[in-house]
Every structure is written in C-alpha cells, then in structure tokens.
Image (cartoon, grey):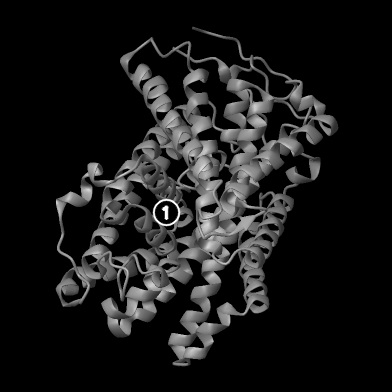
C-alpha cells in the first residue's frame, strides 16, 4: 500500500521530522561499516569477561549440560535478533526497544521497555568495572611477581576507587565519539580473541595431563539429563547473560553506513560468531578441568567467581599473564563500548520528551555527553552500593541482569509481532520473521523471566545475600523494574506530552508497513 509521509513538528525537540517520520538527534551518520559494528558488538558482549564471570554459576546450575544450555540460551537470542532486524529495517532509531515498543504498544509500555534496557546496562557496567578491577590487580601481581598485589582487590575502599577510575576512563573515550571508540576496540577485541584462541588450543592439547580432566561426550548436549525446569530456566538466564550485548549493533543504526540493513545484519552475525567462541571455550575448559568440586573442578566454589583465574596457569603456564590481560582488556573494552547503548537510549528518550531535556545535549564529537556522564555516575554508584551489601557481587548482578535482559528483549520481540500484524500473512517470509520467530523468542524469554523471578524470592538464591528475608537477586531485578514504574509516573507528571502520544504516535509513517 502507499501512504503519504506525514511531516510534523516534534514537540520534544522543536525540529521537523525526516522523511521516515523520525527527526534527527544530532548523531553523525556513516561513521561505522559492517566490520566495525560487529567488532563493537563482540566488544560489548566481551567473551573473555562473560565466560570468566558466568561459567562457574552456570555450571553450578546444570553441570555437564553446560554446552546444551548455551545452545538453548542462543535460540531465543537468535529469534529476538531477527525481530530486531525487522524492526530496524522498518524504523532505524537509536532508541531501539524504547522507540519500537512505544510505537507498537504506546508510551507507557514503551517507557518501561526503555527502562529495562537502561537498567540492564547500568547493572552490567558496574559488573564490568568490578571484573576490570579484579584482573587489574591480578595482572600487576603476575607482572611484578608480588602475590600481595592481587589481594588489593579485596580492599573494599581501594576496589571502589579503582572502579571509579576505570569508569571515568571509559566515559572519556565514549565522550570523544565513535571514531575514537572504533580505534580502541579494534585493538582490544583483536587481542582478546587471539588469547582465547591460544587458551582453547593449549587446553585441547594438554587436557589429558590434568588430574581432573574428563573426555568429551555428546551427552553434554542432551537436555534430558537436566533434572528440573528450574535448573533449565536458571541456566538459560545465566546463558542469556553471555550473549547479551549484540543489540548495541542496532543502537548505532543512525550512525552506521546503510543503517537500515547493516545494523541488523551485524547484530545477528555477532550472535552467531559469539556462539562459536563460547562452545569452543566451554568444551575445552570442561575437558581440562572437569566439573568436580575440588581442585580445578568447575564446581569448586572457589573457582566460580573467576574461572580463568583458576585455569590460566595450569593450562597456559608462563603465558597465563596473557589471559589476565585479555580479561582485563575485555572487561575494560566492554565497559567503554557498553556506554554506547544507555547513552543513545537516554538521548532518544529525552529527544521524544520522555526524559528531561539535558539528556539530549550533544557534544562537538556528536555524542550525547550529558547522557554518557549520567550513565557513568549511575553505574559507579550502583557498583559501590552492591560491593557493600553483597558478598558475591558478580553472581548476584549476573542473575539480576538475566531478569532485565529477558524483560526488555522479550518485550521487544512481542512488540515486533504486534507492530507488523497487518503484514504477517502477506508472505511466508513475513509470517516466519515477523510473527513466528518473534513470538517464540519473546514468550520463551518471559517464561524464563517469571521462573527466575519466582525462584529468586528465596534468600538462598544466588550468593545467599538477602534484604529483609527476600533474595537480593529478586530485590535487584524486580525492585529496579518497580522503581522504573515509579519514575515513569513522575515523568508523566513532568513531561506529559510523550505520555499523551504527541511525540511518538501510533499513526506515524514508521508504523505503516510497505508491501
């Protein structure tokens, strides 16, 4: 069908809309190509960091079925990435979830989708900074031969101060724009992948020499070996964490060459590449270390926080320092690149009048400077608070992050099916990519969300930390969503235009699906 494009003055910005119904935000287009966007996606996912943080908790839930859990966790990710591609091809916008869900379900649901995305990013930024601190002091210890330096990470005041320094450095690079970010990421991501490849090769070559080693078995891919659905849900929730971050490829769609196509392709390609990396590292690690509770065993709770800390020396010998440096560079690189997503989301929410005007302030580098600084302050503050109240910051924040990811990814996928409801029967392709895949991915993620939420109410869930008898993971995950609802009501009073549908409307041209 044909439709005359309606132009209107955006009451949030005072500027005219573009031909596709979305007014410019001040971002500079054409800065990134496909390779650069994929590198940015891999950097945000941070394979070395995510594996050292998540392998222990995940294998604690599912044991030898770790590889099949990663495969199962990948299924909703690839389904959701296809939904993102369809939405991006129709309406490329840096607000992604916030903008698309608003157009599909209205401003109230859209605002909560945007909040879920922001909350996930703030949580993971604090987590990234924590891992960077641990491996920074471990690297100094290995470099100087002074074992006491590694213990400095346990000094809470020093740990928090060092975390603030890492966040400040990441904010500075992000402030200077995507060109600077791209240069930094090429080097850090390349080094990280090189060291992971070396780790895998040496683990396969020497696995039989380990006292806790186990031979490879295809039974690791047998889901029937998992005893309860709760284990599957918890395992998938943790698995989802290790894939999360590919959607940053869509966040930079307004700054990418041919953003309607390139950003979506990059997101899907990033997820597939990372799956391959994870399966190789996981199998090699299980074969070398086994899943026992003693020594190098992956179920040894002393190894859970940082798997690579325990295994780097036995596998890599004198080259173990490279793994410490790789995880440090991985977490630092992801800390920096992850700022891209919340800053663009905050910019979009302010641009459409859902947040105060300062969040849409742009710098001479074409970056949302105020939003970047705000994300940095929030993430550093969250880390400082969590470090005081939780004995196992990494585990609890990873589990809470899984809740946030399931919420906003699932909501975006279901929004895709509703958004394109008028065209899903026009072709087999549309039926599959606009209805079946999004619904399967979205519903699956919400099932995991609710199962994990119920399980996390118990104080013993996660690290065992609790608040008034309620598990800390539940307090973080559900509590932060509830806090978002409170802020939404406040914003509705302060910025009513967005909530009345004046800035993103159901009848905007982006909602009309071309034949």
Which residue is rendered at x = 53% and y = 39% of the image?
253
- Image coords of residue 421 (percent x, y): 48, 14
Q: Count the marks: how many?
A: 1
User: In what element is the residue under mark 1?
Assistant: helix
Give the farthest residue toward the top.
Answer: 1
Question: Which residue position holds label 1?
Answer: 42
Which residue is rendered at x = 59% and y = 38% of the image?
94
87 vs 323, left or right, is right
Compare residues 393 and 87 and report the one nearer the observer.
393
360 vs 109, left or right, is right
Which residue is rendered at x = 45% and y = 33% of the image?
447
- Image coords of residue 75 (percent x, y): 34, 38
The picture quadrant where one finds residue 312 is bottom left
Give the farthest residue toward the front.
Answer: 469
313 vs 333, left or right, is left
The picture quadrant where one finds residue 196 is bottom left
Compare residues 250 and 75 and report the one nearer the observer.
75
- Image coords of residue 294 (percent x, y): 31, 73
Is residue 197 positioned above or below 346 on the image?
A: below
Residue 254 in view, yes or no: yes
């Amino acid at each position: 069908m044909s439709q005359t494009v309606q132009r209107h003055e955006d009451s949030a910005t005072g500027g005219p809309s573009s031909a596709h119904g979305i007014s410019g935000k001040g971002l500079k287009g054409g800065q990134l190509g496909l390779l650069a966007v994929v590198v940015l996606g891999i950097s945000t996912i941070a394979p070395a960091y995510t594996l050292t943080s998540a392998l222990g908790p995940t294998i604690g839930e599912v044991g030898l079925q770790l590889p099949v859990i990663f495969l199962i966790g990948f299924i909703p990710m690839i389904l959701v990435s296809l939904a993102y591609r369809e939405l991006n091809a129709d309406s490329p916008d840096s607000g992604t979830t916030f903008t698309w869900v608003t157009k599909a379900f209205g401003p109230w649901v859209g605002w909560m989708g945007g909040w879920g995305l922001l909350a996930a990013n703030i949580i993971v930024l604090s987590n990234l900074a924590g891992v960077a601190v641990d491996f920074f002091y471990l690297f100094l210890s290995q470099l100087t031969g002074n074992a006491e330096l590694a213990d400095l990470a346990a000094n809470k005041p020093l740990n928090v101060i060092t975390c603030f320094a890492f966040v400040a450095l990441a904010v500075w690079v992000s402030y200077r724009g995507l060109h600077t970010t791209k240069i930094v990421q090429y080097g850090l991501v390349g080094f990280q992948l090189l060291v992971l490849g070396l780790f895998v090769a040496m683990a396969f070559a020497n696995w039989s020499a380990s006292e806790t080693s186990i031979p490879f078995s295809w039974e690791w891919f047998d889901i029937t070996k998992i005893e309860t659905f709760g284990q599957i849900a918890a395992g998938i929730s943790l698995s989802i964490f290790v894939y999360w971050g590919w959607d940053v490829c869509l966040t930079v769609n307004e700054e990418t060459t041919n953003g309607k196509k390139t950003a979506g392709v990059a997101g899907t390609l990033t997820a597939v590449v990372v799956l391959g990396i994870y399966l190789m590292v996981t199998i090699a690690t299980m074969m070398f270390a086994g899943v026992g509770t003693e020594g190098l065993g992956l179920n040894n709770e002393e190894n859970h926080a940082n798997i690579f800390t325990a295994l780097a020396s036995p596998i890599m010998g004198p080259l173990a320092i490279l793994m410490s440096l790789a995880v440090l560079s991985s977490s630092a690189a992801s800390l920096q690149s992850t700022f891209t997503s919340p800053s663009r989301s905050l910019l979009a929410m302010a641009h459409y009048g859902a947040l105060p005007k300062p969040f849409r302030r742009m710098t001479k580098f074409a970056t949302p400077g105020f939003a970047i600084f705000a994300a940095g302050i929030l993430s550093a503050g969250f880390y400082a608070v969590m470090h005081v109240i939780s004995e196992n910051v990494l585990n609890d924040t990873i589990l809470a992050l899984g809740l946030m990811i399931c919420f906003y990814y699932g909501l975006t996928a279901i929004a895709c099916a509703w958004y394109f409801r008028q065209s899903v029967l026009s072709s087999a392709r549309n039926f599959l990519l606009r209805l079946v895949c999004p619904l399967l991915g979205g519903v699956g993620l919400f099932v995991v969300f609710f199962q994990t939420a119920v399980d996390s109410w118990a104080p013993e869930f996660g690290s065992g930390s609790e608040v008034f008898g309620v598990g800390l993971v539940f307090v973080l995950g559900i509590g932060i969503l509830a806090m978002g609802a409170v802020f939404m009501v406040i914003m509705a009073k302060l910025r009513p235009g967005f909530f009345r549908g004046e800035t993103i409307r159901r009848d905007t041209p982006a909602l009309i699906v071309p034949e």
